[in-house]
Amino acid sequence: MTTTLRVFVDGIAFWAPTLPGWEVARAAFGGDGMAVDPPLKRPSPDLLAPAERRRAPDSVALAIEVASAAARDADRDPKTLASVFTSAHGDLAVNDYMCTTLATAPTQLSPTRFHNSVHNAASGYWTIGTGCHATSTALTAFGRSFAAGLLEAATQCATDGDAVLLVAFDVQAVGALSTVTKSDGLLATALVLAPERGPRTRAGFELTLQSGPADTVALRSTAALALAGNAMADALPLFEALAGATQATLTMPLSASLALRLVPIAS
Amino acid sequence: MAQRIVPIQITAYTTTTAAGRGKAALLSALRGNRSALRPNDFGPTPLATWIGRVDGVESEPLPRPLADWDCRNNRLAWLGLAGDDFLDAVHAARERHGAARVALVLGTSTSSIGATEDAYRALDVEGRFPEGQRNPLVHTLHSLANFVQHALALEGPCVTVSTACSSSAKVFAAAERMLRLGLVDAAIVGGVDTLCGSVLFGFNALQLVSPSPCRPFDAGRDGISIGEAAGFALLERVDTRAEGGLRLLGYGESSDAHHMSTPHPEGLGAEAALDDALVRAGIDTAAVDYVNLHGTASAKNDEVEAALIARRFPARVHASSTKGFTGHTLGAAGIVEAAASLLAIETGFLPGTVNSATLDAACGPQIRLAPARADVRVALSNSFGFGGSNCVLVLGRDAR
């Protein structure tokens, strides 16, 4: 039995220091635009109050930025959107702070940094900021976290019949942890996925599970290749495809022995 | 929108907690009304608190072929998988359906961060992790699920859910969706969290840790006791040829939209998750026989949860918190308390709320300190986490 999940992309968002927004990223992926120079430092999402915006970990600022942009792009009220947050490592700077403090002065640990260390911190700030009571989850699947998040979001779409916001992000590895865990720079993407085609639909895909090893799709643009060191880089082939509106089938590895296959639905 | 679901079969389950290995050890502690908490003896500079520690984890490294994954959390996962012939049940499911048709969805709050903490205490002169502690697959949150997938030779979808203390309740929801759609034919769900500096000192920083064994719903409660645990369940679509057996009847998930580390004062999110769970199970609260409460013994959680139970459930419902037996096992709490609820359904033994002596005035007649016996057809398990993440499970048995 092969199950096919149909999802439609109603909202797209992208943020990296060199590609701060989907319009810039789309142009650069398509060869019609350039990366921003000098790169931005980090996003500054309006949803957070000014003090919160300054204090928020990079992971939270990134996630909130793309989540807001994708909901706006899809013309959906964030209050009602179920959400799936996915990140290979969560906030690596917070982890480095926690482990450093625990090794030196454990009783001095900051309570705020501790509650920011949970993997669902971005999901928490997003639902608090938007007043959203819908379900929200936070996932990881190491280097396959985007594909795993996409599968979960598509699964929710297909079962509950509502639109789902998928938010994917990873940040720079820092400190001693960076000698083991590899992730360069900041990268965040978001999609609003809907179970039916609507007025905002930009693309549609049929998703199936494909057993056996699959190759990662090679990146085509220099702008995307420059981001390949981030732990969320498994998102990039899909965003290149969305930029080019190509009709090619994509396979995204979920593990060494399983892949997610995306066949575009003709509009 | 939440809609009624077709019940999912719970073919096998197991849990290992401070009370011991396998579900019989937990049941024995519940029956004996014995708390498994002990004075904190974990780590180089233990805080003055009580913990639920699993005996023997330090002295049982992973078997040689799995040695690259060695760390406290993966050891506890391995010990947990060995309970209640669970490995045999997984093997049979893999044979029945094929390795690619078995999903693995595990919850954890901190996974193997304890190994990363250890490495930070032993950095070399250049500030790098010490030799022999540099496996990137260990120093990351997906370590647990990645390890278990490898150890069980599974090839289906494999994902970690990490939503703090609701993690290993939400795994049931994710698995049900994959089973319903036919993406897989079986799913291993569960969760593992182990004692580590992050949670002991983190909850201490938030002034949420009790200096004595936690007393859920007690008028004098003064915080949580942190525990560690592993638990797993094998879920499949119902085999209509087989009568009897345990069921996942429903689940509800919601967000508080209130605060990162404090529950919504009116329990808005918790109640939304409850309503969602009841809709999916196609029941109302009158059909519920037992509620395993989140009941952490933090001042705020218990106040909000007690009010929710008092306003929504009939007086005859037996509700209790088992945190005093095991400690708050954080990302593993969902699966541990699902196991306690399934034990209630299987045995008719309803656990009490150990350590507590005087119920808070906010408690209705539903919240019980003493254990009891009754026929349990439907049990609920509440799990609420940081970030305002809520999940309510509805568990039952074959109604035929």
Image (spheres, coloured by chain):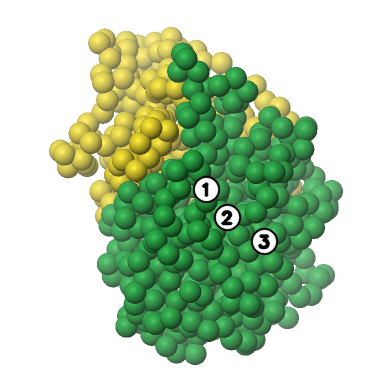
Chain colours: A yellow, B green
Name the amino acid type tagged 1: Phe
How would you rate the neighbour count of disc 3 (Cα within 10 Å): few for under 14, some for 14-19, many for 20 or more?
many
**Dot 3 or dot 2, earlier in sequence:** 3
State the image quarter where residue A119 is shown: top left
Rounded to the nearest angstrom, the CA distance separating label 3 from label 2 is 9 Å
Residue A213 drawn at (x, y percent): 71, 27
Question: Could you tell whether A28 is left or right of A5 in the image?
Answer: left
Which residue in the structure is indicated by mark 2? Answer: B53
Q: Which residue is mark 3?
A: B20
Name the element at disc 1.
loop
Residue at point 54%, 63% (across, down): B37
* x 35%, y 11%: residue: A32
Label 1: chain letter: B
**x, y percent for residue A17:** 31, 20
In this view, A151 is above or below A43: below
- Marks 3 and 2 on same chain: yes
| C-alpha distance separating marks 1 and 2 | 8 Å
Badge 1 or badge 2: first in the primary sequence: 1
Q: Amino acid at mark 2?
A: Arg
Give the vertical position of B56 relative to B119 (above or below).
Answer: below
Give the numbered dot on residue B179: none
Discs 1/2, front: 1
Camera-side residue of B297 and B222? B222
Q: Quadrant of residue B336?
A: bottom right
Q: Which residue is mark 1?
A: B42
Q: Residues within 10 Å of mark 2 (few under 14, many from 20)?
A: many
- Which residue is located at x 42 percent, y 33 percent? A103
Q: Label 3, label 1: how many angstroms apart (C-alpha)?
A: 17 Å
